[in-house]
Structures are given as structure tokens and as C-alpha cells.
Image (cartoon, rainbow, N blue to C red):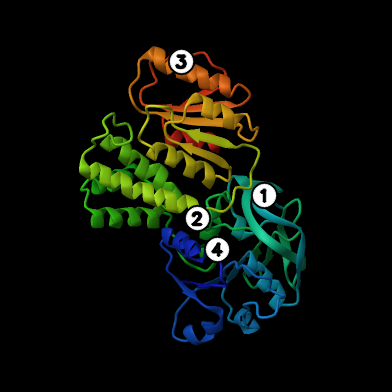
Amino acid sequence: MILIVDFGSQTTHLISRRLRELSVQTRIIEPETFFDEVKDIDFDGIIFSGGPTSVYEKGAPTIDAKIFALGKPILGICYGEQIIAHVLDGEVRSGKKKEYGPATLTIQRSSPLFDLPPITDSLPASLAVWMNHGDELARLPTGFEVVGVTETIPYAAIADESRKIYGVQFHPEVVHTQFGLQILKNFALICGLSPKETPISEAFVNDMISSMLVFDEAAFEKVFSAAVLRMGFYETVVNVVYPFLIKTGVLWTTDKSVPAQEHFASCIIRRKLMAATDGLLPATNTSRCFLLFLPPGEWHEVGLMFANYIIRANGFPTVYLGQNVPTEGVAQVWASGKPTHLVTFFTAPRPDEELSFLLRSYSRVAASGTLLAAVADHSRLKLKMGNLSFLDGITSLDKWLK
């Protein structure tokens, strides 16, 4: 079992969920009650979560230094790394540059925490990570060495290998960090556990989809939750929920009077997508901005909501116009200069000439950018537009963004 000391992070439960995906038991404990609660617990390692405060502020959550004498492997994440330095004899200060979003970690020293073949077969090696901090380490505690750095953070990953104590300034638990799950798996291995990564098999996805087809609300919620627990929300959306809507025909339906059961499933998914999108961190990668809309005559918005969530979850900003937007409206927003890409869905069947006309119209609007279009049946189209990419759904969009 790995204990997670919660210093107030929004992703504490996500850390726990990621470890459970690896079949590792977890328990979340408050720092104030840690030593009282662990008296009768058999555990193998400790993770310090992130937190919203500064470790040097009066009243900031902390932990007694005797936790480092327990002899258990410890991994500090973000605020957790800073706690390690602050409680020991290191130093933490306000960062020269606050980081909120993607960064490149350069691994300089070999460490079992960063055993990531083939990436780390030769060093230095780089991987994409997700940062969310205002403070940083100014001095390492005694016995620690630098494992990884970024352009702005000289102590982005640190280790005292002899005591198996590790600190990372980034968040391995979020999907934006490359090999984040493997890093957590490596820590479980350091703790002497035998994590069993549960790959997303085709059989598992098909079982989830079949279970959802009962259209019973309680059962649907149970299956959905099981998939999220196994894969995380993002992976569930891409690998289970979207294929489910394709299989039922709800996503591409041409009739507003869809069966009540299918409509109910769509409504549940819409609510979950809206809540998940609202809960995402603000976009930080402004190199691309996506303008999302449905053309006139399109009424089923759930496909566009999928696209909005996937784009936002990958760190990019969106401008969401929604349903039945005329070309003039799209052009007006595009002219603001903010969007760089258009994203639209065509679900209703249209004559080739009408569809070609609409796509050419949008292609001219986004002449300086890229038009991404998902069409129910676009294999018959033979359009020559350099800035047009046809996507056959969210899976293609997910791969394209990566």
C-alpha cells in the first residue's frame, strides 16, 4: 500500500486513481493526523501531494521531519517536493518565473524513478511534463542530487537514492505528462510492490460498450465509473464513450426523434463532458486556438462537445460557438485574429454539392489556418483543399493533437 499525504492538491485523488490503475492500494491521509493513522497500517511507501500554498508561509501545511526516519520510499510531487526541501535542510523560494502548463524535462542522471526505455536508454533525455507552481527549490537538502532540469527550474527532479526519497516539481499524475503513469509505476516498484499495468484491451472496451447498451441509468453510471477508474476520464472518453455513441448511432443520427433510451445516454454523456471541461485547468499552450461550431442544419452537439473537451484537455484554448452557426458568424469570429483552426462536425447526410460548397466556404474563411472536419461519410468526397483535414472522429483528433 502507498499512503498519499494530502497537502490540499486538486489532484490528490487523481494520484490515488492512477495508482489503482496499476493495481496498487492507496490511502489518503491528512498531514496533521499522519502518525496517529499509520500506527496500525502496513504500508510500503509515501507520496506527498501538491498543494496551493507556499511551504514558507505561516500556517502552511507541513509534516514532521520524523517521517523521513521511517525508512519508507517517499515521492514528493510539486508542493510535495518543496516540503521535502523545506523540512530537511534545503531551501524554497518564490520562483523567478511561475509555470502553469507544459514544459520540457531534461533527465541528466540515471534513476530508477525515470527508468523509461527507450527514452532514457541514453542521457540526457527529454520528455514533456506538466507544471503548475509559483515556488521552486533554491537549495538541495543534504544527500540529494539533481536528476532532471527544465529551462527555468534547476531542481525539477531530485533524488536521494540511498534513502529512496524523490521529488519532482511537475505532475506525473496528469495525462499531459509523458510517461507519467510509468513514473508512478516505477515508484511503486521502488516501494517493493508489483504493479500490474492494466492495458486498454479491445475486449475491455467492447465489454464496456456492451454494458452501456442496457440503457439503465444506474448500470450506465456504474460502468462509466468503472471505465474511468481503470483508464481515467480522458482515456474513457476517447476509447469507450465515443465508440459507444458511434455503435448506437446516436452521434451520427439523422432524426431528431431519437429513441428515448439513446437520448438519455447522450444526455448523461453531455453532462459529464460539460463538468469535465469546466474542471480543466486554464489553457496554457496558445500556439493554437480552435474555433468550434456546427453548421446550419446540424442539431446534434455532442460530437462538438467531445472535440472541445479533447482540445482543452491537451492544453489548447477554444472558442466554442455551438450549434447552427452561419458562415458569416464563423467568419466574423475568425477575423478577430484569435483562432488558428476551425473544427466542425457534419452528421446529417447532405448532397455532395452542398457539402462541398460548405467545406469550401469554411476553407476560404480559414485560409490562413487549418480546417478540421469530421463527416459521417466523407470517403466519397474528392476535394482539393490544402488546409482541410478530414477526421473520422475523436480518436483521429486525439492523435492529431499529439
Residue carrying label 2: 279
Q: What numbered label is drawn on residue 187?
A: 4
User: Which quadrant of the figure has residue 301?
Assistant: top left
Q: Mark 2 and mark 1 in contact (Cβ < 8 Å)?
A: no
Q: Position of residue 115 (x, y in %)?
A: 59, 54
How many numbered marks appear?
A: 4
Residue under pointer 3: 357
Secondary structure type for disc 2? loop
Q: Secondary structure at mark 1?
A: strand
Q: Position of residue 171 (x, y in %)?
A: 59, 58
- Lower sequence index among marks 4 and 1: 1
Q: Nearer the viewer, mark 4 or mark 1?
A: 1
Q: Earlier in the sequence, mark 4 or mark 2?
A: 4
Q: Are marks 4 and 2 in contact (CB under 8 Å)?
A: no
**Mark 2, mark 3: which one is toward the viewer?**
3
Which residue matches tag 1?
103
Give residue 175's position: percent from left, percent from top: 52, 51
Residue at position x 24%, y 45% in the image? 210
- Identified by mark 4, the residue type is Phe
